[in-house]
Image: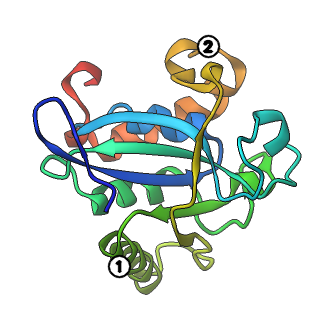
Amino acid sequence: MNEITDKNSTKLERATLGGGCFWCLEAVYQQIQGIQSVVSGYAGGAQPNPSYESICTGTTGHAEIVDIQFDPQVISFRDLLEIFFVIHDPTTLNYQGNDHGTQYRSVIYTHSDEQTKVAHEVVQELEDAKIYANPVVTQIELAPTIYPAEDYHQNYFQQHPYQGYCVAVVAPKLAKFRAKFKSLITPQYA
């Protein structure tokens, strides 16, 4: 498992999720208790060290992702996935809203056998409960090499809350998360 030890000797775990534009996911996961870091990036393609411009062509095979370091004593991987399935549409192949292309696919990159098991369980539970009218198309794959996105993509919503895309797309997803998962929000964002 990809465990990291933080400065307080806490064993952190890693979760890597793609569900449309990484700005949306980053804004949500940054507000959750137990999250130590959220890095926007790219994963799942063949080209090493991709740039935003190259992945936007849809030809590199990368997905926009967030790479999350979290404390499993505070929040579980299952909790992270439950949030994930509320803040994006896992039934649309290669797009979210107006964002189209393979880079916007719904994907869970797992870092352990346990994460793979939990991801499959959560998807099956969603299907069994018939939460969505259409089947869940979220891919579940072992984590490939993950590349951080350019600096200007990091903390994007925090730095540009009034930018058009942030107002129209990111803010509503953040509001949906905050309404449903109020108890998980860190005090600084409550």
Return the residue found at the far bottom. Answer: 128
Q: Earlier in the sequence, mark 2 or mark 1?
A: 1
Identify the element where label 2 is drawn.
loop
Query: Quadrant location of residue 40?
Result: top right
Asked whether 20 or 70 is in front, the reply is: 70
**Residue appearing at x 10%, y 32% in the figure:** 8
**Quarter of the image that includes the C terminus:** top left
Query: Crowding at label 1, few (<14), some or many (≥20) Cα neighbours within 10 Å?
Result: few
**Residue appearing at x 77%, y 52% in the figure:** 47
Residue 101's spot in the image, x, y percent?
81, 54
- Image height of 115 relative to 103, above or below: below
Q: Amino acid at mark 2?
A: Tyr
Asked whether 88 or 130 is in front, the reply is: 88
Give the numbered dot on residue 117: 1
**Residue appearing at x 23%, y 57% in the figure:** 76
Instruction: List the residue tagged with mark 2.
Output: 162
- Image height of 9 relative to 164, above or below: below
- Image height of 146 relative to 143, above or below: above
